[in-house]
Image (tube, rainbow, N blue to C red):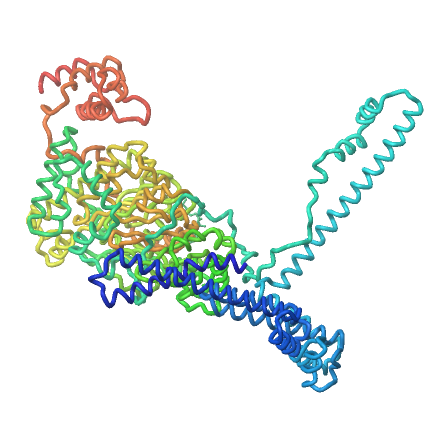
Amino acid sequence: MALASKNNKRPVKTVSRANSKSSSDAKTSSNKKTKGEEAKKTEEAQEEYGLKEEIVVLIAFACAAILVLSNFELAGSVGRAIKWLMFGFIGVMEYFFPFVVAGTIIFISVNKSFIKIARIKAIAVYGLMVDLAAMWQRITNVPRVEGNIFSFFTVCANDKIGGGFFGGLLCKILYPLGTVGSFVIMLALMIICIVVITEKSFIKGMKNAKTKSKEFIEVAKKDYFEYKEQNDLADYEDDEDEELERNGHFSKNANKNAIEENGQIDSTKKKKKSPARRMGRKVLGVTSDTLIERNGQEDSDINIENVEAISNPEDEYSKDIYEPDSNNQVFNGFNSVMTDEDYDEGYPDNHSDSYKESHNEAAQEVPNTLDEDLRADVASDNDFVSAYNASSNAYASSNTYANPNAHASSGARDSLTESYGQAATKETTFEKGNQKKYHKPDINCLKRSKKTAFLGASTGKNDETARVLKQTLLNFGVAVDVVGISYGPSVTRYEIQPEQGVKVSKIVSLADDIKLSLAAADIRIEAPIPGKSAIGIEVPNKEATTVGLRELIESKEFKNAKSKLVFATGRDIAGKVILADIAKMPHMLIAGATGSGKSVCINTIITSILYNASPEDVRMILVDPKVVELSVYNGIPHLAEKVVTDPKEAAKALNWAVIEMDRRYKDFAKYGVRNLEGYNEKVVKGEIIDDQGEVVKDKKPQILIIIDELADLMMVSANEVEDAICRLAQLARAAGIHMVIATQRPSVNVVTGLIKANVPSRIAFAVSSGVDSRTILDMNGAEKLLGKGDMLYFPSNLPKPLRVQGAFISDEEVADMVEDVKRKNPPVVYDESISKTEIGAALVGQSQSQDERDPLFAEAGRFVIENEKGSIGMLQRHFKIGFNRAGRIMDQLFDAGVVGQEMGTKPRKVEMSLEDFNNNLANG
Ligand SMILES: Nc1ncnc2c1ncn2[C@@H]1O[C@H](COP(=O)(O)OP(=O)(O)OP(=O)(O)O)[C@@H](O)[C@H]1O
């Protein structure tokens, strides 16, 4: 053990010494010193240190040798004097004394880095010696315990017997307890010393021994029966053989075969003859599994099966987790710091390099007619709107995607504000203009969470896990201090500070050993915690504390939040309330494996908005291809459109949003404002006059589009969805249109480079692999999360993701709240223009004439009419054209009234005769 420690510690001390030496050198001649000189000094320091250690070891051996020689009176008069003296002190234990002395000197010298523990162990060794000496003295009773205490020394020294002065002294102290009492105490002392020296728990060892001895007895019993059976069989065989030999009928082998056919005995016999029987025997009852108890961690009730985190030995441990400023009482995400200007400046800088790379790559994929600097222009100067229009037109003209009627819907100007206004006129609870009153749901619809465990920071002096953690690392030769503990709702983070010279990678490489000794389902190592000279080891709590949404909505941070799109995210690792403002994100991607907590997170977003914003402030478009997740929200006044469940309809809704964005930008240009805020301010002041000369009283609401499963949309119409998402993501912030996109398939064909680059804020729930984590966050870490709302929250203004336990709201609470909102407010009036919008309509710049029809339009029309049905696939095959072009032609045929509405997977009906079609063509 000493040697092992020696090997472990030597380099540590060497490097440490080398460091200190080089740093002192640096102070005196930092500028002149070359690297070569430094290296030389380091080598010298190493040599010097190794030399010292060797000298100590040699001296220890010399001392031990002299003591051994003294015992045999081979060291002259000095040796005799030493022997006399040592016998006087410790009696017969003197025979072991040389070895103990040598051992302790070596042990202490090689374990200097944890000298305190080494000293305690050394003291325990000497204590054990004295205890054994006292036992010996009590057994032999020479010198007599009743005698004078000083006579112990002289009698033992002269006669070379007894337990010496110290042994006698202990006997004398325990004398009033009588012989048996004294032995009990001495035995207890002996066990204590052994426990201290070996760091093995006696009680647990006993328990293990009991279990093992039970097993041993079981095995012994089994063996005995087997042995008995075998003997019986052998006797049986012998008898048979003898009989057969006597009868001379069969050969021995033939007889055996015959016996084998006779069932059980034969099969047993076969088994007994197998060589595996003896080899299978094990020595049981001997155990080394007696480590000091670990605060019941072995009985951890963490249900590993339920924990999502999957360990992947090849994955690196996350190095990049953001640590919020511990001085801030509450971290408010964007709330605290971000301004519009900050956003534009901060966004590219605050992301990791890999993020920036992906951003740049993806940005190059955007059609080159889109001004690359447009984003920077967005909030920076007064030319913004014209810049937008220029790029918008350029973008549109770069697409030959033509739909003559597209602008019929966009031109209708059936704004959300108007539709909400209609509802208001129907109900008395709504007043005219800006005084419409929205009745928030009752807070009692949300349940109060049960009393929570302690959340927050602590020094962790009495934390048993911290002690085990420290001890485990010490066992591997890494001395650390636990400098702080953060008790979070689902994980506890132990902040450890290694001794100088310990490599961070060494601690990271011990992750599995730490996991084993803490009996933890999975741990995550933050090495180091940014901004701290400490390493964070995140250990799942035995029992996760649910973060109730109600407590967050009732928090003063939420109540004080100015933004209408703020949502209660959860609590961070130190239990602080985390709020996020979607308005400043300005779009967010949520990804995680199934069951990791995405839907609950979306519910918390919607609920937060219902408690915070009126429909006049925020309107939502909910896209739920899974059908069951968001349908419950149908009927709430904030909805701009019935919850969209059909992916095709979803693509239309996205297109509508793009058109709405265009419309808003045109209004902004017309009234000389830069963004939605500016526009609404003018509305309040009564400065917006419409074409009819009337003062516009209705503010434009912010629009939040929530997509619960992007993969389902991408499967149906990847191009249109991607186009619309990217266009919205690039430009919609100033227009007050924001997106929250969730997916359980964070693969590159769902979360494409283009979408990733344009949706800067991310929330990663537990995923199954490091690859998925990198797809979402551009770094590992999410694969170590525990599921059930445990997330890495990575908004675009933070340099590192933040580990947060998401707020929880149950389905019943959602249903109650929705009922309450619907009961208190007038029925919602949906904006019909959304469902009427054509897919691809948004990509049309100006209304286009029939001249811009596809050259194949006439031919395709005739082909479809002749076949009496029309589908994109048919056009593709017949004209050997791509999907997009065939789709455009089909749209043109629909607009010209040649074919009817699409009917899912079935071909469209033909609604025009060939004659009419030719006439129409002739008439232009
Ligand atoms: N913040 C949370 N706190 C506690 N438990 C949670 C939390 N979020 C989710 N859970 C638990 O995890 C379960 C699954 O969550 P959820 O339905 O949100 O997963 P999901 O990621 O949407 O799955 P899917 O993709 O299959 O719909 C919930 O029923 C709930 O028990």
Q: Residue at x 20, y 61 (%)?
A: 32
Q: Is residue 135 visible in this depiction of the protein?
A: yes
**Could you say where residue 907 lies in the image, as x and y percent from the top left?**
30, 21
**Could you say where residue 649 lies in the image, as x and y percent from the top left?**
28, 35
How many marks overall? 0
**Could you say where residue 515 lies in the image, as x and y percent from the top left?**
48, 53
On the picture, is 669 further left or further right than 619?
left
Q: Residue at x 15, y 33 (%)?
A: 844
User: Observer-nearest residue: 284 or 37?
Assistant: 37
Residue farthest along the right direction in this orientation: 246
User: Observer-nearest residue: 459 or 869?
Assistant: 459
User: Observer-nearest residue: 276 or 463?
Assistant: 276
Task: Place residue 33 in its image quadrant.
Answer: bottom left
On the picture, is 860 further left or further right than 671?
right
On the picture, is 341 further left or further right than 613?
left
Tell me: residue 709, above or below residue 38.
Answer: above
Task: Place residue 817 in its image quadrant.
Answer: bottom left
Q: Is residue 428 visible in this depiction of the protein?
A: no
Residue farthest along the front direction in this orientation: 76
Considering the image in quadrants, where does the C terminus appear?
top left
Considering the image in quadrants, where does the N terminus appear?
bottom right
**Could you say where residue 847 lies in the image, as x and y percent from the top left?**
11, 32
User: Observer-nearest residue: 774 or 489?
Assistant: 774
